[in-house]
Amino acid sequence: MIPFRIHILGCGSALPTLRHNPSSQIVEIRDKFFMIDCGEGTQMAIRKTHVHFNKIQAVFISHLHGDHCLGLVGMISTFGLLGRTAPLHIYAPKELRTFLPDQLEFFCHGLDYEVILHDVDTEKNEVIYEDRSLTVESIPLEHRMPCCGFLFREKEGRRHILRDMTDFYGIPVSQLENIRVGKDWVTEDGETVENERLTRPAEPARSYAYCSDTRYMPKLHNLLKGVTALYHESTYADDKLDRAKLYYHSTARQAAQVARDADVKILMLGHYSQRYNDESLILKEACEIFENSVLTSEGKVFDVK
């Protein structure tokens, strides 16, 4: 199966600790690499993966709290030092445009590549990126400032050729592309051979949703129905429910409720408060609601399947 992986670079919350970096991930899908959020320390975390800096073609910033974006300018500078020439696309709330160009002019003057900003409307669920094999949608979230998540969806693949059958019917190589996209075959004798006899179905399309900082949203699951893998912030356990409400964050139990109601395959927990020396309580409370919940940690790689 074609790789679809999530590389965890940072899964802590606002205050860096010796155990966790601020938020950042790399989504690897069909040999493309996309970064989500870029907190401090992201560059060092990348160094510990097999992902080369210049493979990253776009960065998606969920919101402009420092633990999600303060590593961005430094990384852009490093790209320049490494001789990058391909454009870097950045999808972020429009407020990023008010200060990033000045920072680039001051710290990254003379880049040999273009940094292209794309404003994201954090209040809309819409496709903000598309290519031949996938789309990325924005997911409106509720935090203390404009914030959204991102939903990566594979496009449905083509059917797989059964070569013994196409050889049996003498189907020319020039016609196999038509067979892959679902066409039947008509023999010289006028017999119609249905496509289902010549192919097998493509693998089901996979999807990954990243829900960054947000308070519990009872209707969020409607945007996430059937998603393969879900990352949902779980800053606190129930013992800090009051803080979750105050700072517009979610508890692990609330994240699990979203996963259960959306009927996802796996829930990835993260954005842990520094108040916890370990995340066992967070995992326990999530699993009580949604059994297939797992903890993220720096260096972990999750296969979306």
Image: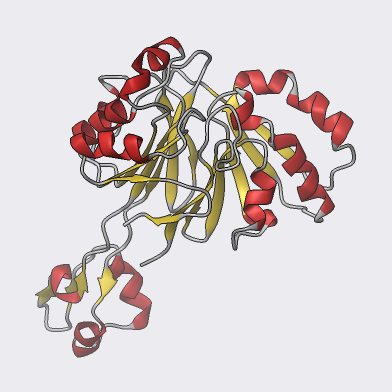
Residue located at (30% from left, 68% from top): 180
Residue 190, relative to residue 140: is it above or below?
Answer: below
Q: Is residue 9 left or right of residue 76?
A: left
Q: Quadrant of residue 89?
A: top right
Image quadrant containing the C terminus: bottom left
Instruction: Give coordinates of residue 76: x percent, y percent.
Output: 75, 42
Residue located at (40% from left, 17% from top): 244
Instruction: Give coordinates of residue 284: x percent, y percent.
Output: 27, 38
**For this rendering, which residue is in front, 238 or 26?**
238
Image quadrant containing the N terminus: bottom left
**For this rendering, which residue is in front, 236 or 261?**
236
Q: Is residue 272 left or right of residue 284?
A: right
Residue located at (40% from left, 65% from top): 2
Instruction: Give coordinates of residue 239: x percent, y percent.
Output: 33, 21
Q: Return the residue found at the far top.
A: 246
Asked whether residue 222 appears in the rendered view, the answer is yes
How many labels, in total?
0
Q: Quadrant of residue 116?
A: top right
Q: Is residue 290 left or right of residue 123?
A: left
**For this rendering, which residue is in front, 73 or 23?**
23
